[in-house]
Amino acid sequence: MKAHFFVSLAALLAPPLMASEPVMFCERPLVAQPVAKNTWMVEGLKEELSASNCGHIGNQAFIATPSGVILIDSGSSPHFGEALKTLIAQHSSQPVRWVLNTHHHPDHFFGNAAFDEAQHLTLTTTRALMARDRDALIDNVERLTGRSLERSLIALPDAIEAGDITLGSYPLTLYAMGGHSGGDLVIMDHATGVLFLGDMGFYQRTAATAHTPGLQQWLEELSDLRALDARIAVPGHGPSAPSDTVLEQTAHYLTWLDQRLSDVASEGLGANHALTIELPDAFSTMALTEYEYTRSVMQLYPRYEARLLWGAPH
Amino acid sequence: MALLMQTFIPQRLATALAALACLLTTVLPPATHAATMNTAEKDPLNSFMWPVHRERFLGDAPVVFDERVIVSAPGFAEDSGQVPLELDASALEASGEPITDIIAWVDLNPIPRLFRYSPMSHGLAKLSLNIRLEQASAVRVAVKQGGTWHVGGTYIEAEGGGCSTPGIATADTGWENTFGELQGRLFAGEDEQRLRVRLSHPMDSGLIPSQPAFYVQSFEMLDHQGQQVATLDIEASVSANPTLGLHMRPSPGGYVIGARDNNGNRFSIGLQP
């Protein structure tokens, strides 16, 4: 018993942890939660971008490999990226050599500049969306967080093909999807059974739909992801959990949203009627439900009318 | 290009607005004794433009704030070029004399007025449409019954979320391809026929330099015999591709909806139950 205690104590004090000061960002400690062997995630606040959270609303994850660290998403500013870099250094003596960006939204790639010695990679479709929306998204982040960004630091990553890849000696499988944003990179680590969903998956935080090509596509892709039988999933927002749990909650909400919009639009009622609907109790554990639902109605209602009333295809 | 008008540049707009406010305060005479007598109780939305617009749109007629004039909108604008607005004054209408006139405006828009609706013989006091919102503002609807204006309103924040990209996500550069398409559906109910119509039109306000004003000015509702039974005049503060929800007394032969823009283009569609 006593011996065991001392072993544990020795383990606790072993470097590099012994030297760890808590890394602070926006007056809060930034925490790396273990997800699997050599794999951690940093969970953002379940909020919209604001001055009080300094933009730390999305998740990041990293895998420490013998030939360097693989980082998945980098947060919403170079300033945040610097804090993330310090945090990662507490868990691996290797530098970040690869940054994979799951999609083009600002909370997932605006921190890239802090990792200037790493290769920055994303899908071709995602890169095109980044080029299209970058300026508008910089404006949004500045407006909502009240902090200015150095525009030249928000650079575009290089494009990479989906499929099996090896970073250093570490194999990953990349899937090209698009349900959430039009260009969504999903990453499977078969060695640990961890599925990095980006914003294809939201857990305990309601899904945002601003750039979805259609909820049907998103739902189809979610069922494809279920078939991968991953052990654990890291969503783009909210905590990690068993993969089925995360995928099921995202799909449940999107199915409900799709049905409500269809019902109201097909009766020829206005968008405000969709907003009077009471949200089901099943979604009460999720953050931002009323806010995201209101946004989704405004974003998507005209499309449902076009399809259901005016006979537009799709 | 047509849709760029929605992306008002804040600084320019603020200047234009300041100039407008300035102009209005100098041009309009200060409130006279008669006008003061007609002043309703305190503006529940506490907007500094209320006295100006009240005088401009409602004149000397008596004004009351009335909770039976229900104005619904989301609390914030996700896309400031397309904000769904809905009026329901059916409780007021049910209480007595007919509704003769309905006027709506956005306190802080460069073109404040949204529409003027004359329900005439067949229109009910309900209406929905999408509006443009230049900045966070009070939105008002004044409903005239028996010579008195009954005013309702709501406040809308003009701020989208972090990953929304207004004007990019919705930009439709090929508007010429669908220009003038008027689509509609009639939903027959016991007490009313609900009409939903959509007109493909850029609704250019003329506020963008070198882009002339090009917008729909009026809709009219005719019964199956061609008799005009309600009219709706709109301004370019109504969103591109105007989509209207109209509530009409049941008409066995349905309705014909006609529209006209400021270039003289005419559009029409017949809707049967």
Image: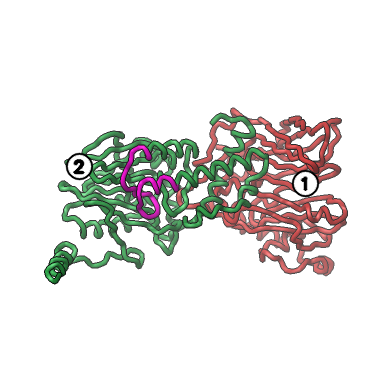
B106 or A5: nearer the eye?
A5
In the image, is residue A119 part of the stretch drawn in magenta? no
What amino acid is at disc 2? Tyr
What amino acid is at disc 1? Tyr
- Gap in angstroms between the C-alphas marked 1 and 2: 67 Å
The colour chain A appears in is green
Is disc 1 in the same subunit as disc 2? no
- Residue sitting farthest toward the front: A1
Q: Which residue is mark 2?
A: A170
Quarter of the image where one finds residue B52: bottom right
Compared with B95, A13 (above or below) is below
Which quadrant of the rendered structure holds the N terminus of chain B? top right
Compared across the picture, whether A111 is left or right of A303 comes to left
B229 or B215: nearer the eye?
B229
Q: Tag 2, which secondary structure?
A: strand
The colour chain B appears in is red
**Which portion, as a residue range, is magenta?**
A225-249
Compared across the picture, whether B247 is left or right of B156 comes to right
Circles 1 and 2 in contact, beta carbons < 8 Å: no
Say which chain tag 2 marks.
A
Q: How is the image coloured?
A: by chain
Which quadrant of the rendered structure holds the C terminus of chain B? top right
Picture coordinates of residue B5, whole percent (x, y) = 58, 43
Q: Residue, x 67% and y 64% (percent of image)?
A: B45
Say which chain tag 1 marks.
B
In the image, is residue A234 part of the stretch drawn in magenta? yes
Picture coordinates of residue A128, whole percent (x, y) = 38, 37
Q: Which mark is residue B117?
A: 1
